Amino acid sequence: MDILENRMNRIAEIHQKINGYWESLSAQGRTDVRIMEICGTHTVAISRSGLRATFPKGLKLISGPGCPVCVTGQSYVDKAIYLARQPDVIIATYGDMVRVPGTTGSLEAVRSEGGKVEVVYSAHQAVDLARRCEDKQVVFLAIGFETTAPATALAIRQADEQKISNFFILSSHKLVIPAMRALLNDKDIRIDGFLCPGHVSVITGWRVYESIVNEFARPCVVAGFDDEQILKGICEILRQLAEQSPAACCVYPAVSETGNQHAQQVIHETFDVIDTYWRGIGIIPASGLGLKERFSRFDADKRFNLPVFEEHDPPGCRCGEVISGKCIPPECPLFGTICTPREPVGPCMVSSEGSCAAYYKYDRH
Ligand code: SF4
């Protein structure tokens, strides 16, 4: 009981501080503030806890490009579907990708037609699958940010050392900082501060956000995922705005200044930084990870003679605008009517970290 009571008291204190900073901002003539939560896990936690309803009117939380499935382009989904239809290929993928609609169906639909699509929980499981199925070509859908890239890199190393010749990756790994920079350079989006992603920052450390602060003078605060952590992060952003002292900092004890340097090294040794496509944003220079030449034999793009697929969103879907903070899910005309978790039109309604799925489940009414 004491633990719960203490927690409630701490949360009440943070709310008081938030209201205090808000009053200070209002006195300076600032009546609306837009904070972007980059991470999909934050988006879901914010919706689930009902935090938005507790904030001063004018304080807006907007979703960012931090759901790995949502930012992955349609052409990538179409490539995966094409590969899944090849008779000797097994697609190994994280579960959220299975139901993402492509131009000609989804991996789930291909599986029901007899295509081989296996859900795995790690890149290593995909390597194991390749070892067990020697007569098949196993293609792992390598998506995600700095968080999942080290595991993909280690899986490549493992396959290399064990001379596994039927394991490949279709890489769509992405880096968060270039996306933040691209959004801040977009004149159609206003972002006053960032609630930075906890998981990514465990790898990168929180000081990487100093480059954003130095260039754009926006608060960048790393927070964890429970409501107290999220409130602390938002409170710190408001403090910095009220005191006009933007900084990079961290309220999440799991994140250090410089992050996991071993994981950073593994990424650096396995991948080159490349330009890559983000749904809703377009091609962002130096924002993706492609395999280094010495590991290129694991690159599914090179191993299979893949046709060129165009980038386009499903008709009427506003996922691209949702994940770049230009609109919120209920502003999409398909939200909750034509597009639902049961029959999703875009990836933001499919992914467990998708903003549309979170709004549908917790904020619909
Ligand atoms: Fe796309 Fe559906 Fe979200 Fe609209 S509600 S943006 S169609 S996922």
Image (spheres, rainbow, N blue to C red):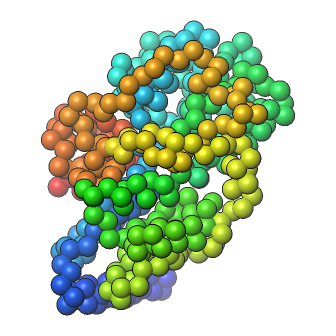
Q: Quadrant of ligand 1?
A: top left
Q: Is residue 109 above or below residue 29?
A: above
* Residue 212 x/y as whole percent: 47, 67
* Residue 161 x/y as whole percent: 84, 34
Q: Is residue 84 above or below residue 142?
A: above
Residue at the limit of the structure toward the top, as seen here: 87
**How many numbered marks appear?**
0
Residue placed at 74% from the left, 16% from the top? 134
- 355 vs 10, left or right, is left
Quarter of the image for residue 133 reads top right
Q: Is residue 49 above or below residue 138?
A: below
On-image quarter of the C terminus: bottom left
In the image shown, does 65 or 337 lie closer to the viewer?
Answer: 65
Residue placed at 50% from the left, 13% from the top? 85
Quarter of the image for residue 103 reads top left
Residue placed at 63% from the left, 30% from the top? 169
- 280 vs 147, left or right, is left
* Residue 332 x/y as whole percent: 19, 44
Quarter of the image for residue 299 reads top right
Q: Is residue 202 above or below residue 112?
A: below
In the image shown, does 295 or 6 lie closer to the viewer?
Answer: 295
* Residue 22 x/y as whole percent: 26, 84
Whether residue 38 appears in this view of the structure is yes
Whether residue 226 appears in this view of the structure is no
